[in-house]
Image (cartoon, grey):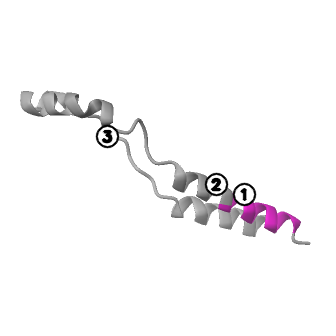
Amino acid sequence: MNNMLCRLLIALMAWTPFQMAHGDRVQAMSDQEISALASRLDSLPAGADSSGAVLLIIIIAAAVWWYMYKR
């Protein structure tokens, strides 16, 4: 049983989308690009959209609960 649970969690982790963080290369930007970015900075989102992550956590928790208590 534990082997199947481990495989399920590994598969779910592999299925989870990952976004790699890349540092902004400000030194390579022109002055016009920097000023355009600075003017839009307040309207940009502070972080990634977390609605998909919350849904994925709920699905994983439900799958683990179902697997552990289906007896």
Where does label 1 land, which residue? 61
Q: Which dot, 3 or 2, sits closer to the camera?
A: 2
Say few, some or many: other residues with alpha carbon within 10 Å of mark 3 (under 14 / 14 to 19 / 20 or more): few
Question: What residue sits 47% from the left and 58% below the top?
Answer: 17
Quarter of the picture containing the N terminus is bottom right
Looking at the rendered image, the disc whose residue lies closer to the viewer, 3 or 1, is 1
How dense is the environment of label 1, judged by Cα within 10 Å: few (below 14), some, or many (20 and up)?
Answer: few
Q: Are marks 3 and 1 in contact (CB under 8 Å)?
A: no
**Is 28 displayed left or right of 55 in the figure?**
left
Label 3 residue SS: loop
- Contact flag, marks 1 and 2 (Cβ < 8 Å): yes
Q: Residue 22: give its label.
A: 3
Inter-mark Cα distance, 3 to 2: 25 Å
Relative to 50, does residue 38 appear above or below in the rendering?
A: above
Note whether 54 is above or below 36 in the view shown: below
| Residue 8, quarter of picture | bottom right
> Disc 2 marks which residue?
57
Does 42 appear above or below 8?
A: above
Residue at the image position 80 percent from the left and 67 percent from the top: 66
